[in-house]
Image (cartoon, rainbow, N blue to C red):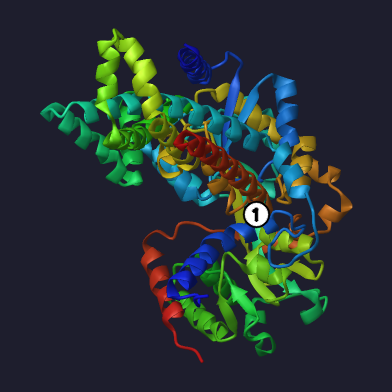
Amino acid sequence: MKKPGLPKVILYATFVFLYIPLIILIINSFNASRFSAVWEGFSLKWYTKLFHDRSIARSFTNTVIVTFSSVTLSTVLGSLAGVVIARYESRLQKAHAALLRLPLMMPDILMGIGLLFFFITLKIPLGLFTIILGHVTFTMSYVASTVRAQFQNFDYAVVEAAQDLGAGWWDTFIRIYLPLLAPGILSGAMLAMTLSVDDFVITFFISGPGSSTLPVQIYSMIRFGTPPVINALSTILISVTFTLLLIYQRFSRRSMK
Amino acid sequence: MKRNLLWLAVLAAAAVLLFGGCSSKEKETLFLYNWCDFLDDSLLTQFTEETGIQVVTDYFDTNETMFAKMQAGADGYDIIIPSAYMVEIMHNSGMLTELDHSKIPNLSNLDPEFVKLALDNKSQYSVLYTVSTTGIGILKSQLGDLDEISWDIFGDSRYTGRMTMLNDMREALGAALKYGGHSLNSTDEKELAQARDQLIAWKKNLAKWDSELYKNGLASREFSVSHGYSGVVLQAQQENDDVKYMLPKEGVALNVECMVIPKSAPHPEAAYRFIDFMLGAEEAAKNTTFICYLAPVKPSYALLDESVLNDPAIFIPKETIAKAEVYKDPGEANALYSKMWEEVKDAQVQ
């Protein structure tokens, strides 16, 4: 047996650093004490309070609507963009690719302020609609790049064979492109989903009355709200994210086989 | 073709959600922009039952974030509940509606003692929502069950290292000014210099300047004496009976939150009805009991519970009101305040 070397120590230290805060947060969500300084016994009262809070329920619904709509839109738009960029190497597509990469590198705060001024100038009332549009603008880029990456080992012979055998563009798209690109599209969609669920900076600027999403809600609760309720809410968010990840891993493993 | 259908279904569902979520329903809605945990939710239900107006609440965490959003042009809020100093800033930027008193018959319910102290003491563009104080939280087990306290408790070397003062220029200098017998809005250089020296003398006994964690510190008995806001000390008290809130005899700062209607409010009529509703005696009493901040509605006092009336952290005693002051913008003296505060922070004490 080899002694655990430095790399292993670093690995464990990283895990501890990453997960200890999450674990403490989860434990504290069951703490009866309002301040996490002292453990006052096991309690589910924060969860009860959480489920009776109307504005939290509202921002939860808002988050579901925003995530679902923006992920759907950006998956469709992003996949199409990824396909054309990978398929046609014209100058136009190179410019297209560069433009799509921009939101990946632009600081969120600039995106947020820019979008806010844009919507206000056009007199579009701030609300769920603007948040969805805002999320599509940056999640689309992530989908496009994962789909584009899928073309690295793409066998165009299959496409040509299908066309040879008389498949029209629709059949080629549905039966050839889509199944072959599915892993890229799915992982892009998952990425878009996680980004959309927990985006704070951009959403903060472009949300209007009554359209706060969960991250915006959590942020405004930190100073004057009840900390354990935030812990409880975060615990639920973490569980949902982990479940999504597990499901996704199951699927991607199956598609690898 | 199964896959084909699936995609269509997903797209259709998305479209329904996207547009279903955006079309506004015809029911009348009031958009409220408030602090978190600063209103009894059951009152909103009652308001909807009585008027048919739905209330949707968004929260802000500081006056500044709210103001930044409003200034950027975000509109759509009908009622905002900022602190008094921010009300002034918003008023000076021309954001607030001049209130039509004929639409708020309950306005006469407001306690004149507090209205008199407010910056907008004719309720021209703001209506008092809550009043609270900045005082001192102590541990009874350490200091005894005192009847009276002075700001000079921070000079008591028995508690060295176990005391905190608010890390806030106005609050800290205000406490020292009050101790020196001056107004906490003083613009006199000599008085301010005296307050600075007083703070430096107290500083050597302090564990730290702290505005965030003192409630945890009191609840866990780490600190024995903390300069703090009544509502926050009360939260620590709910955790730990040993905590007691006290009002220094020299006088305290009065903190005021107000309801305002921005000019951009889409439903001003609903906003007036809401303000009038919150000024009702029963409604105000209910709110005071729930949020532990006093709604200064005079007829509601008779409906308050004995325990609330006897709690100086909620129900501010008459003799305290007489010596209480609201912070005003010092104008040109702002620079003087900053200079004194910097000197306090930089002072070396052993």
Q: Position of residue B344 (x, y in %)?
A: 46, 79
Query: Could you say which quadrant of the image residue B99 lies in?
Result: top right
- In the image, residue B249 sits, relative to residue A51, either above or below, namely below
Q: Is residue B46 left or right of residue B134?
A: right
Tell me the SS state at disc 1: helix
Q: Amino acid at mark 1?
A: Pro
- In the image, residue B134 sits, relative to residue B30, either above or below, namely below
Q: Is residue A248 left or right of residue A50?
A: left
User: Looking at this view, is B231 or A23 the one in front?
Assistant: A23
> Label 1: how many residues lie within 10 Å, few (<14), some (14-19) or many (20+)?
many
Number of marks present in the image shown: 1
Query: Could you say which quadrant of the image residue B43 lies in?
Result: top right
Badge 1 sits on which subunit?
A
Which residue is at 74% across, 22% downward? B50
Q: Position of residue B244 (x, y in %)?
A: 77, 68
Residue underneath mark 1: A227
Q: Position of residue B89 (x, y in %)?
A: 43, 47
Query: Could you say which quadrant of the image residue A173 lies in?
Result: top left
Which residue is at 48% across, 40% downward? A194
- Asked whether the viewer can see residue B315, the reply is yes
